[in-house]
Amino acid sequence: MLLTEKFTINNIGCEILNQREIMRFINLINNPYYAHLEDSDFTKDIPIIQD
């Protein structure tokens, strides 16, 4: 509660989560079934100066 009060004093919104909300939050961040795939082909993004 003290940490919540310090955030509120500095105009930073926060709330204390219950156990169910904590589990949903952890699952949202650390979901192993979701992987962000990036295009690893950097050659199309590197400019080449031709003579």
Image (cartoon, rainbow, N blue to C red):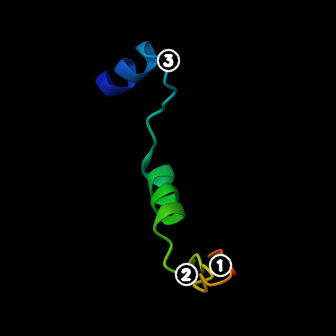
- Does 6 sit left or right of 36 as displayed? left
**Closer to the camera, 35 or 43?**
43
x and y percentages locating residue 8 in the rendered image: 45, 18
Vertical relation: 6 (above or below) 27: above
Sequence-first disc among 3 and 1: 3
Classify 10 Å Cα crowding around label 3: few (below 14), some (14-19), many (20 and above).
few
Q: Identify the residue at the far front of this view.
A: 51
- Residue 33 got which mark? 2
At 45% from the left and 52% from the top, the residue drawn is: 22
At 62% from the left and 84% from the top, the residue drawn is: 43
Q: CA distance from mark 3 to mark 2?
A: 35 Å
- Residue 11 got which mark? 3
- Residue 48 got which mark? 1
Mark 2 element type? loop
Sequence-first disc among 3 and 2: 3
Q: Quadrant of the C terminus?
A: bottom right
Mark 3 element type? loop
Can you tell which of label 2 and label 1 is closer to the viewer?
A: 1
Vertical relation: 41 (above or below) 5: below
- Residue 3 got which mark? none
Q: CA distance from mark 2 to mark 1?
A: 38 Å
Sequence-first disc among 2 and 1: 2
Kindly identify the amino acid type of the residue bearing the numbered disc 2. Tyr
Classify 10 Å Cα crowding around label 2: few (below 14), some (14-19), many (20 and above).
few
Can you tell which of label 3 and label 1 is closer to the viewer?
A: 1
Classify 10 Å Cα crowding around label 1: few (below 14), some (14-19), many (20 and above).
few
Vertical relation: 49 (above or below) 4: below
Kindly identify the amino acid type of the residue bearing the numbered disc 1. Ile
x and y percentages locating residue 35 in the rendered image: 56, 78
Kindly identify the amino acid type of the residue bearing the numbered disc 3. Asn
Mark 1 element type? loop
Q: Quadrant of residue 1?
A: top left
